[in-house]
Image (cartoon, rainbow, N blue to C red):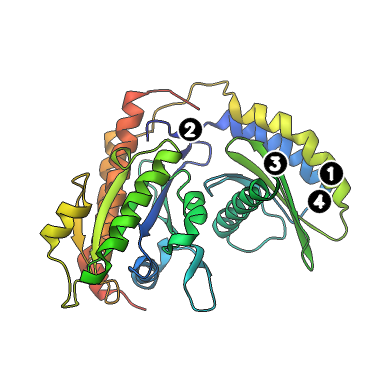
Amino acid sequence: MALINLAAGEINYKIVYYGCALGGKTTSIQHVYRKITPQVKGKLVSIATEEERTLYFDFLPLTLEKVRGLKTRFHLYTVPGQPQYNASRKLVIQGVDGIVFVVDSQLEHLDENIEAYLNMWDNLADQGDSPLDLGLVMQFNKRDLTNVFPVNDLNELLNQTGSPAVESCALTGEGVFEALRNVTKQVIARTEAAEEMAPGSSR
Amino acid sequence: MGNNRTLVSSQLDAAMQVLDGLWTELAPRFLGLITTSGHMLTHVAGSFRGSVDSLASLASGSFAATRQLTLLMDGCDLNVMYQEGCDVNIYISQVTEDVLLVICFGKGTQLGKVRLMAGRAKEPLALALESADEPAAPVPGGDDYARGVSQAIDELLSIEGEQSGTD
């Protein structure tokens, strides 16, 4: 759920990079941190193991210039991908507005991708959310490798919501901005729609 | 996403009054209200010079993890968390279902006093955050806002920018 802070003149959104272990979630957020205009980015925080595997989350705040007097802020998070860290994933997706689901396109990782995708549905359902109600982009990563599934197959197997899909190579950054651009636009559009449906509502 | 949380000026003004009272009583290093999903609502930074966004995300994450840990250990819910540091101590207290009060204080302030004052502040803070005197306005700007942000996103995350950005 977006936090609309009219007193501070800002709207805050939470975007989470979800997906199986070693799929490219942290690499994607690190690419954003390295390449985005310095003026809009805050500090990149990572809670990781000594082997640089995500233990809890990575966090990167982005702040856009004011539009119509409102500052728009996107808080980017990653979840730990390893199956045993599901409790941490549940905590990170609390209050999520949009998800970039990062798929490892390699043939041998199909089952892990499916498991992660189903896990995302389960964890969202546990908190009363659904991917259908959020911004969602499928980021088919590692497209630079040769042993990868065709995008059509991945779409058929994993993209049950018919969400926009972006091919990427997080290591070089190709497609990373495109996926982020797509999901941020979706959450903006959804907030506007929600406000129109419930004008003047306040929780 | 139909349940966006909207905060209006009167709510934050009322909350800030309570925080000001806490500030006077405790003279902490940092005082803030954050959401359980990691957003900063309002704060008084005092001598704290770090990133308040990082603080909010880490404090909410830490509280959420500890809460799950206590549920796992003894089945009891957690609404207060205290962490003693070398120089600065951190006290986090649940104010409402989705808002936490974070107090960072030095060795010169007694934990008992922090507990007492945070406990007293809980009800007025919850009242301030849960009731709005003025109706929440829809997002200012409406279509113009969405279009403007969409354009800003395009400019910020253009493919050209992706390729020409600097390390």
Query: Mark 3 belongs to which subunit?
Result: B
Task: Say which residue label 3 marks.
Answer: B76
- Residue A191 falls left or right of residue B8: left
For the residues marked 4 and 3, what is the alpha-carbon distance in whole angstroms?
A: 32 Å
Asked if marks 1 and 2 touch (Cβ < 8 Å), the reply is no
**In what quadrant of the picture does the N terminus of chain B appear?**
top left
Is the residue at mark 1 from the same chain as the one at mark 2? Answer: yes
Q: Position of residue B89 (x, y in %)?
A: 77, 59
Instruction: Look at the picture and state if A147 lies above or below B148.
Output: below
Is the residue at mark 4 from the same chain as the one at mark 3? Answer: yes
Mark whose residue sits in front, 4 or 3: 3
For the residues marked 2 and 3, what is the alpha-carbon distance in whole angstroms?
A: 31 Å
Query: Mark 1 belongs to which subunit?
Result: B
Q: Position of residue A141 (x, y in %)?
A: 25, 67
For the residues marked 1 and 2, what is the alpha-carbon distance in whole angstroms?
A: 29 Å
Mark 1 or mark 2, which has the lower sequence index?
A: 2
Is the residue at mark 1 from the same chain as the one at mark 3? Answer: yes
For the residue pair A113 and B78, the one nearer the viewer reads as A113
The residue that appears at 53% across and 37% down in the rendered structure is A7
Task: Say which residue label 1 marks.
Answer: B25
Task: Say which residue label 4 marks.
Answer: B27
**In what quadrant of the picture does the C terminus of chain B appear?**
bottom left
